Image (tube, rainbow, N blue to C red):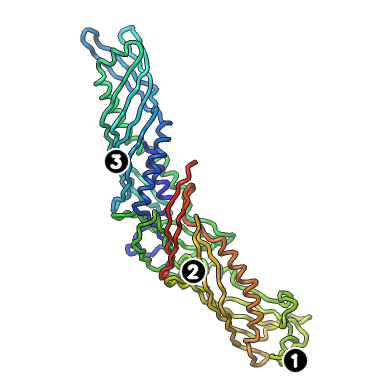
Amino acid sequence: MGALAGALLSILLALLLTSTPEALGANPGLVARITDKGLEYAAQEGLLALQSELLRITLPDFTGDFRIPHVGRGHYEFHSLNIHSCELLRSAMRPVPGHGLSLSISDSSIRVQGRWKVRKAFLKLQGSFDVSVKGISISVNLLLGSESSGRPTVAASRCSSNIGDVEVDMSGDLGWLLNLFHNQIESKFQEVLESKICEMIQKSVSSNLQPYLQTLPVTKEIDSFAGIDYSLVEAPRATAQMLEVMFKGEIFHRNHHSPVALPAPVISLPEEHDKMVYFAVSDYVFNTASLVYHQEGHLNFSITDDMIPPDSNIRLTTKSFRPFVPRLARLYPNMNLELQGSVTSAPLLNFSPGNVSVEPYMEIDAFVLPPSSSKELVFRLSVATNVSAILTFNTSKITGFLKPGKVKVELKESKAGVFNAELLEAILNYYILNNLYPKFNDKLTEGFSLPLLKQVQLYDLGLQIHKDFLFLGANVHYVRD
């Protein structure tokens, strides 16, 4: 019976874990929500999983004594009890505010087969039996929590079960004798089954489901130096209509996971319930990524003359710069130049309704490369641009790409006198379009995975852009082994 709890919670907690942000001291970076539709689907999938699991369960043997007038006392034993078939018709899973989930099963039946033995004095007889168990109902609460490590926990509580009717049919030598006191046997069967149902559920939750949830990673690798923290901000929380859980959703440097000064915004999720599950991913997730890659120097670049197309009108040489920076050519005749660019601070994404943009600011240092000495700084530029970001959502991850905007160049300092820095825009535009953007877009195409466990797939996807966060909706498909 505990298989149902395992199947349902595996689907649910594989999908998400969220809470209301207003109740926390620290806001989550990623919020997930399971609606009534999601819980209903989970209950249906759980019934299918339970029907398969029940056929592999062996019920405990039980014994008893009997006394029949004119026959006397005897001893019976029922063993090798196996569930031959089962029909689970109805189930429901509902959130219990402040606790977790309530699981109920009703209008269900199973058929049990096995062997019996009777011993009276020196007489020993045996045969087979069939038991039809009808009107099974089960109710159990599943308490959801979290450890200090950020992993989820689950425990079964308030379990109750009831069986409406038990019918026993015995065959074999003196089977008719046992049928004389079948009421006693049926009552014993009902007592044994009702006592074992909750015992099996609690054992399955503690021995199977809880260890399984412990395998849920609280961090996930993105690449060689970045990872994402999916630890729970607090215990999963149930409200009247949905199950919610919150993830930290912070991207960090794998070699030195230090606190991030950037605060996560409060997320106010829209009141939508058409999909089974919703994810809200705040700009905090993307901006902590920007901090990591900026710290790693991943946003820096260098341009040399051999990187410019041969047919370009402008070369990175002092001779080529003579028409608009004549003093440079006089001070450093016939020398190559190198441009070194760096983003002055980690560029932060701006989420507004229907739009995602970022405005990176760069500094570019120009060096001459004397043949017999070290390179020398000759001028410095500031570069600004506005970039649009297109974010997409597939069955398991969020990806995206950047659309370039116009580059604006301004001269900040120069050893070669004042000149029109806009003349360098052609070189910068070519390099940014053909080198920087492809590099960033390759990384964005890899994306980062949503917190899903194995066997869960999303479909019928929808994406909205709100102030400070993405809002993703999807239905769920559970892939069976």
Q: For mark 3, does the 10 Å Cα neighbourhood hold few (<14), some (14 to 19), or many (20 or more) residues?
A: some
Q: Given the image, on which type of amino acid does mark 1 rest?
A: Arg
The image position of residue 205, as x and y in percent, is 38, 41
- The CA distance from mark 1 to mark 2 is 45 Å
Residue 64, given in percent of the width and then of the height, sits at 29, 19
Q: Residue 330: give its label.
A: 1
- Indicate which label's residue lies in the foreground, 3 or 2: 3
Q: Which residue is mark 2?
A: 287
Q: Amino acid at mark 3?
A: Ser
The quarter holding residue 317 reads bottom right
| Label 1 crowd bin: few (<14), some (14–19), many (20+), radius 10 Å | few
Query: Toward the viewer: 307 or 155?
Result: 307
Residue at the image position 23 percent from the left and 13 percent from the top: 67
Distance of label 3 from label 2 (alpha carbons)? 45 Å
Judging by the rendered image, the residue that carries numbered circle 3 is 139
Cα–Cα span, label 1 and label 3:
89 Å
Mark earlier in primary sequence (3, 2): 3
Specify the farthest residue to the left: 69
- Tell me, yes or no, whether the two marked residues, 1 and 2, touch with CB atoms within 8 Å: no
What secondary structure is found at the residue carrying circle 1? helix
Mark 2 residue crowding within 10 angstroms, few (<14) / some (14–19) / many (20+): many
Amino acid residing under circle 2: Asn
